Image (cartoon, coloured by chain):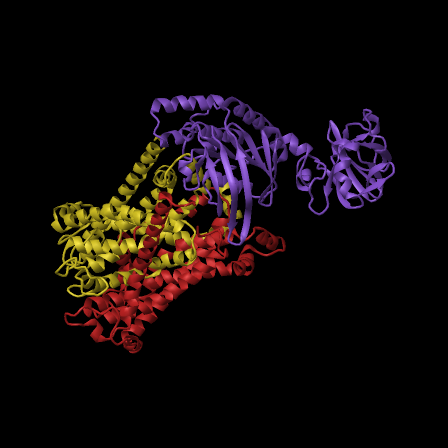
Amino acid sequence: MAIVRLQRINKSYGDLQVIRDLDLVVDDGEFVTMVGPSGCGKSTTLRMIAGLEEMTSGQIYIDDVLANPIPAKDRDVSMVFQSYALFPHMTVSENIAFGLKIKKYPRGAILKKIEWAVSLLNLQGLETRLPKDLSGGQRQRVALARALVVEPRVLLLDEPLSNLDATLRLKMRAELKRIHKRLGATIIYVTHDQVEAMSLSDRVAVMHEGTLVQVGPPLDIYNAPQDTFVAGFVGSPSMNLLSAKIIRKDTGFFVDLKAFELVLPEGHRPRCVSYVDQEVVFGIRPEHIYHRGSWKTKSSAGNTIDVVVDVVEPLGDRDIVEVKKGDANLTLLLEAGAEATPDRAMTVVFDMEKAHVFDKKTQRNIIH
Amino acid sequence: MKERGTPMARIRASKVLWFMGIILMILVVLVPIFIMFKYAISDRSSVVTGGMPIPLWPYHPTMEQFRGLMSMDAFVRSALTSMKVALLAVMISLVMGTPAAYALVRYRFPGIMVLATLLISVRLFPDIVSVVPIVEIFTKLGLVNTVWGVAMAHALLSTPYVIFIAMGVFETIPKDLDEQAQILGASRFYSFTRIILPVALPGLAAAAIYVFLLSWDEFIFAYFLLAFGGLSTLPVMLQKVLSWTPQHNLLAAISVLLSVPVVIFTFVVQRYMQTGAVAGAVK
Amino acid sequence: MTRIRHLAKTNLFGIVILAPAALYLLGFLLIILFKVLELAFTRVSPQGPLFPTAHHFVALSRNPEFRQAFVRTVWFTLIGTPLELIVGLVAALLLVQAFKGRGVIRSLMILPLTIPTIVTAIMLYIMFDFPGGHVNDILMGRHAFFPFQVMSHPVDWRGSGFFALMVSLFGKVWRDMPISMLIILAGLQAIGQDQYEAAQTLGASASQRFLRITLPLLTPAMSTVLVLRSVEVWKEFIFPFILAGSYPLLATLIERAYHEWRNPNEASAIALILLALIIVSTILVFHVLKWLRKRLVKV
């Protein structure tokens, strides 16, 4: 399929700038997700790739050809809309065949392709139905079939799963991954759900207020978030972010959270040297704070802290536990049945290898 | 750079076409209206030009036609007749139509919706087909050439609309109101007249204005019922003037006086209906 | 029996207040129908009225004036109805995209409906006057802003059936334009924007989008317009009455029969024929459109 290159894309509506200096390259066969909170500009970017919106400045290249002057209908880029946008007066087959009819494919070829799309997306038996007689999940599959059957260079998906209920969403996520694997299609996906982004993509592009904050494989985004926004956005429950100070003692470097201190591991020290005695933001994910009983011994001496349990939310296989220590509030993700009782003390262990330190002014990650 | 190429040119061309279309449409709509006003203030030399092209704007704009009409007996009488007929028509159709609409909305006996549809569909019967029988019947009843006759004919035309609009108004009034009144011991009549009607008044006022305008404008029945008597309504007078002395500026002046109240009121009512006061009714 | 009495008792108030309107409307409707039938099938003869007789229908069928009026009316409706649809469609298409001042222009477009029909007819009478009149002057190039001489002699707009009815049709379509426009505009606005966008990404050009998405989804609105407007054009009276006096349609012929020929019976017969035409045509148009819709979806 194709390579999509976005160069210095800017978009403004009058005085309001919604996309700022966006650069992104999507390689042939890659599954890239643009993820971010509502209003961050991801759908707008997608529409610009499709040709449905114009950019104020910047260039889009599809397969090394400048796509800016090419209208949407000639870009060979398919899009699945959040509302599916199925043609209500056409049957499933007719919807799927639409793009092929426009391209003037011979009847025999069209029928073959419809068959292929129907079997790919499990739509057997629904060919003569009208959209109004289909369930949400079925409509979504028809929208996908319609977009795929024209063999587009790029497949764009605009929050395709948000109108589905939770179980269906999980099912369709698996379907999409399967289709990607089978077709090797170049897919650009937009969602506000970071779980979807992480589970589906080869690379994730995190957007915030019109700019791309970080692009990379899901694990990089998770393990090495470039700033507090990405750190807080990815991962559920979100990362604990607390004001702290780096202090230096004879025994080593510490992260001083006023209520308690944590030892900074050797590996992180070089980067924090310049921040001694300065205010920083300390971050650690709930899943990286363990109940003492379940902590497998690692060299983390000094990171055992006693806290008071505030609220316990049982999820079934795990518990979200809110704890307090002095003025600090922390969220923990523990195994179910961990001895956490509200208003009682508990001993927890911080895995400092997995901790992050962010510059207070720039909000950027110091360690990674 | 970007955006240089045939797609842009094509988009610009379609925009130009669209713009031309809009301008053309506006012109077509406004021209007859302009004609009306222009001729109404035309002096004689701008109308009777003896072979010269009629000027697009009168040589000496004048209000003499209007002044003349104000003192013309026939005109004043016609205007008064139109007014009487219209007011009577409003009265008759509202008195009949409003309670009927209330009954159709509040009472749910089987077939009620069929009845409602039937009553409103009476309007579908072509005017020109019903005119001759109506005139024959009214002749026997002595209603030809009378204000009452024309008003009754107009009521026939307007009551279905009153029912339609009033049904919409009553549908927006919650049933709780009557039920509340009934629990407190009021008779249905009392609750209808003292409680429901006042609440429905704004919407019914819109219906009243609609009927008034319908009657004010109406030509066919008025013409057939008043053709050979001394009475006439304004539309009928217009036609009489046309067939006797087709002076264009006179015709236009009468037209202006006939039309302006209608246009103003129609827009007022339309704006009113848009504010949702009669929300459910007119779709 | 008691069930009905019970129903009547509990609903007495409702029945009582419903009665006047119901009796007035339905009563008159029935009386009108009976009267029209009675008149049409009665022949006034020296021996007194004869009923029932088809005399008038036979006489009309032999009457050249009636036959001409019949043919004219059919043409008038055949051309006028689609014209009303097309004008409404064009107007709606011009107004569907949002633009600055659209609300004002849309209100302006309602104007033709608010002007009393008789006034519009007379204004057209004035505009299409012969030998003077603005239209003739402009078409002969006698005004500076339109220097093209389309014709060298003024047209007598009321002097030929073709022109007289053409002007009448123009008036009718002008006046009714807002209604068709509003119905179609509502239909257009019900089509979601994202369907057009989906079609774009699938390669459809503007004309393809119009033909494959807009028109099919607009067929219910267009059918409504065609059915409603066809009835209206059949029974149009005022425009032909003022503008085409010498070339009557069936509706204006009724007036002539009543006032000139002083024959209420023949007038009623014509009225009945017109009514029958309207009913038959409406049913026909309705079913043809239904059949067409079924065929369109297959394609």
Front residue of A9 and A339: A9
Tally the marks. Answer: 0
Q: Quadrant of residue C196?
A: top left
Residue A157 image point, x, y percent:
52, 34
Q: Quadrant of residue A366?
A: top right
Q: Is residue A95 above or below residue B266?
A: above
Residue A158 image point, x, y percent:
53, 36
Instruction: Identify the image quadrant of the C terminus of chain C.
Output: top left
Residue C147 image point, x, y percent:
20, 62
Chain (yellow): C
Is residue B177 toward the left or the right of residue C75 in the image?
Answer: right
Chain (red): B
Residue A273 image point, x, y percent:
77, 40
Residue A135, visible in the rendered structure = no
Front residue of A286 and C66: A286
Residue A290, visible in the rendered structure = yes
Q: Quadrant of residue A336?
A: top right
Q: Is residue B105 above or below residue A170?
A: below
Is residue C25 toward the left or the right of residue A30 in the image?
Answer: left
Identify the residue at horizontal 80%, vertical 35% (top origin): A264
Q: Colour of chain A?
A: purple
Is residue A103 toward the left or the right of residue A62 in the image?
Answer: left
